[in-house]
Image (cartoon, helix red, strand yellow):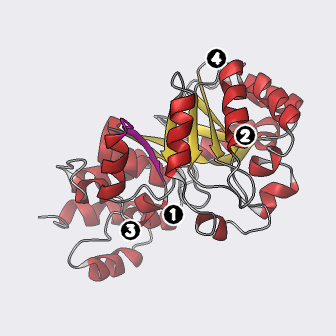
Amino acid sequence: MNYYLAPMMGYTDCYFRSLVENIYGNSVTTFSEMIVDKAIIHNETKTITKHFLKNNKSAIQIAGSDPEEIKRAINILNKVDIIKHVNFNLGCPSSRVQENMLGLALTQKYDLVKKCLFELIKYNKDVSVKCRLGLGMNEDKSYIFDYLKLFYEIGIKKVFIHCRNGVLNLDTKKNRTIPKINYNLFLECCDQFPEMELIPNGEVNDLETFKFFQSKNITQFMIGRQFAKDAFFLEKLDLENVKKKTASIINTINELEHYKYLNINLLKKSIFTALSNISNSKKVKKEISVINNYSGLLNYFERNAIWS
C-alpha cells in the first residue's frame, strides 16, 4: 500500500515531513502546508528555503484564485529542482482562506477554477488536486462528478478526495466532524472515473477502514491528523514495519543541522509525535522539553535507548 501525509497547516512543516520520511522511507509521500501563490511570487527564495530542505522529497501544495498569479508561481516552481510535485488546494474551508477566494471557496466559481487549472498544468512535473466531495451539508453528486470530469479533461488524473463535504459557514474544526464521511460516494467516483487515480482522505485511521478500502481494491490513502497524533501508527496497525526507530529520529535531527531557519521547539514538536505510545512517554517528553539547542537534542537520542 502507498500512503500520503496530508497537507496540514501548523503540522506538515519541514520538521515533521522529514521525520515521517525517515520513519517510513518511500512508503509515505509527504505534502507541505498550503502555500499561497503570492508568497512564491513575491518572496520566492525565503518561501522555498524555509519550507523545503535541500534534500526535499515533499510535494508542495499551493493555493490561488488568480490565473495570472498561478501562472507566475508555476513559472517559478518549474525552475526549482528540489520540488517535483505540485498539488492544488480546492478543499480548505478555513475563513482566512475563504476571504481570498481560495480552496473550497474557489469551487463556487467553476469557470475560474478551470482557468486556474489551465495555468497549473503548465508545471512540467507531477500535478494533482485535493478537493472535497461536495459543497454544503447535502450530498450533491453533480458537484464532484463535474469537477472530476473537468480535472480529467484538463489532464489532471491524480486527485486526493476528502471523503466529506465542505461547509463554508463552519470553522475548520467543525468541517472535520459535522459533514458526514461518505465513502460510498467516493467509491462511486472511482466507478465513474476508472482511468483516474482517486485517493481517499478523511478518518482513514483504523484497521477496519483500511480493510474496507482494500476489499474495494483501493490501496492508496491520504492520512492527516492520525500521523500527527502518533507518527508510528502505521506500525501499530501492523501495516508497516519500522525497525530502526531511534535512527529515524537521529537522521531527522541530522538533516536539520544546517537548516537556516532551525527552530528547536518546532523540531521537538515533531519528535513528540513519535513518542506517543512509549511506556515512559511523559518522562521522556519532559526531559526533551528542557533541551534548548540542536546538539543537546542530538546527544539525547544518541545516548538514550528510547525503544528497546
Spatial CA span between label 4 and label 2: 30 Å
**Rendered view: 295 above or below 64:** below
Nearer the camera: disc 1 or disc 2: 2
Name the residue type under label 3: Phe
Name the residue type under label 2: Ser
Hey, which quadrant is residue 307 in on the image? Answer: bottom left
Tell me the magenta residue range: 216-223
Comes first in the chain, label 1 or label 3 = 1
- The residue where tag 4 is placed is 124
Comes first in the chain, label 3 or label 4 = 4
Nearer the camera: disc 1 or disc 3: 3
Nearer the camera: disc 4 or disc 2: 2
- The residue where tag 1 is placed is 266
Q: Could you say which is closer to the camera, residue 199 or residue 241?
A: 199
Tag 3 secondary structure: helix
Comes first in the chain, label 4 or label 2 = 4
Tell me residue 263's x, y (percent): 53, 61
Residue at the (31%, 68%) spot, across then down: 275
Asked if the magenta segment contains residue 222, the reply would be yes
Tag 4 secondary structure: loop
Comes first in the chain, label 1 or label 2 = 2
Contact, mark 3 vs mark 4 (Cβ under 8 Å): no
- The residue where tag 2 is placed is 142
Name the residue type under label 1: Leu
